[in-house]
Image: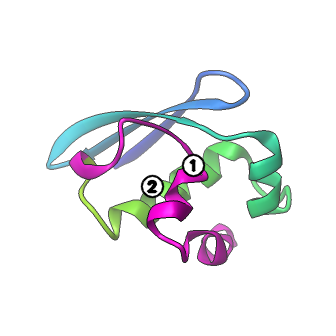
Amino acid sequence: MIQVRKVDDTTFEVTVEQGSTTTHTVTVSPDYCRKLTGGRVPAETLVEKSFEFLLERESNTSILRSFELPVINRYFPEYEKTIGDRLD
């Protein structure tokens, strides 16, 4: 289970319950959110779908505890190309 809580306009606290429970702090700029979503969905949805993407590739205990959303693309180059499909 993934829970996303908005801390402020750019920061989100994500709790993942999958075996063990982990908490992550994620930042996403409005510009990056618009780039990936085209303004179709709120940033909370982008963050949630991004964690679904990550959890398909690694365990919640392997995900960084604090990161900026663009970091995902460094580890998984297909991220930016495929995340839009998850938002529809």
Report the span colored magenta.
61-88
Relative height, residue 47 to residue 52 (above, below): above
Query: For the residues marked 1 and 2, what is the alpha-carbon distance in whole angstroms?
Result: 6 Å
Marker disc for residue 3: none
53 vs 42: above or below = below
Quadrant hosting residue 41: bottom right
Left or right relative to 67: residue 43: right
- Secondary element at tag 2: helix
Taking the spot 85% from the left edge, 55% from the top edge, the residue there is 39
Residue 47 % position (x, y): 57, 49
Which residue is situated farthest in the left direction here?
Answer: 19
On the image, the x and y values in percent for residue 54 come to 40, 61
Residue on which the image places disc 2 = 51
- Kindly state the secondary structure of the residue where label 1 is placed: helix
Within 10 Å of the Cα at label 1, are there few (<14), some (14-19), or many (20+) other Cα atoms?
many
**Height in image: 31 above or below 84?**
above
Residue at 45% x, 55% y is 51
Q: Position of residue 26 (x, y in %)?
A: 53, 37
User: Which amino acid type corresponds to the residue marked 1 in the rendered image?
Assistant: Val
Dots 1 and 2: beta carbons under 8 Å? Answer: yes
Query: Residue 75: x, y in percent?
Result: 44, 63
Residue visible at 22% across and 46% down in the picture = 61
Which residue is denoted by mark 1 in the rendering? Answer: 47
Q: Quadrant of the C terminus?
A: bottom right
Q: Amino acid at mark 2?
A: Phe
